[in-house]
Image (cartoon, grey):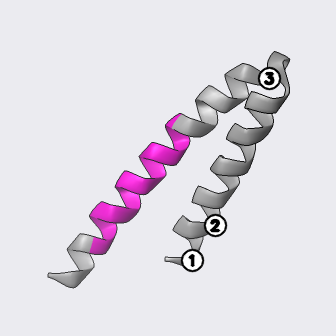
Amino acid sequence: MGLIVGLLVLWLVLAVVGFVVKSLLWLAVVALILFVVTGVFGGVRHRGRVR
């Protein structure tokens, strides 16, 4: 679970950098997409372990 949280934090940092530096807006978009994918993957993986 620590890896998932670490990745989520990394994607958030990259998204913030992408929004702050206007020429790196593509980085923000990619980071947000990866944030959502990682969150979904972590949620599915966590649910499978609980049941």
Q: Which mark is residue 24?
A: 3
Tell me the magenta residue range. Answer: 33-46
Badge 1 crowding class, 10 Å Cα cut-off, few under 14, some 14 to 19, many 20 or more, is: few
- CA distance for labels 2 and 3: 22 Å
Q: Which residue is mark 2?
A: 6
The x, y position of residue 31, in whole percent, is 62, 38
Q: Check residue 20 in the rendering and tell me which mark sits there, or answer none.
A: none
Q: Is residue 9 above or below residue 31?
A: below
The extreme left residue here reads 51
33 sits left or right of 47 in the view: right
Specify whether residue 44 is painted magenta.
Answer: yes
Label 3 SS: helix
> Residue 2 bears which disc, if any?
1
- Disc 2 to disc 1: CB gap under 8 Å: yes
For badge 2, the amino acid type reads Gly
Q: Amino acid at mark 3?
A: Leu
Q: Is residue 29 magenta?
A: no
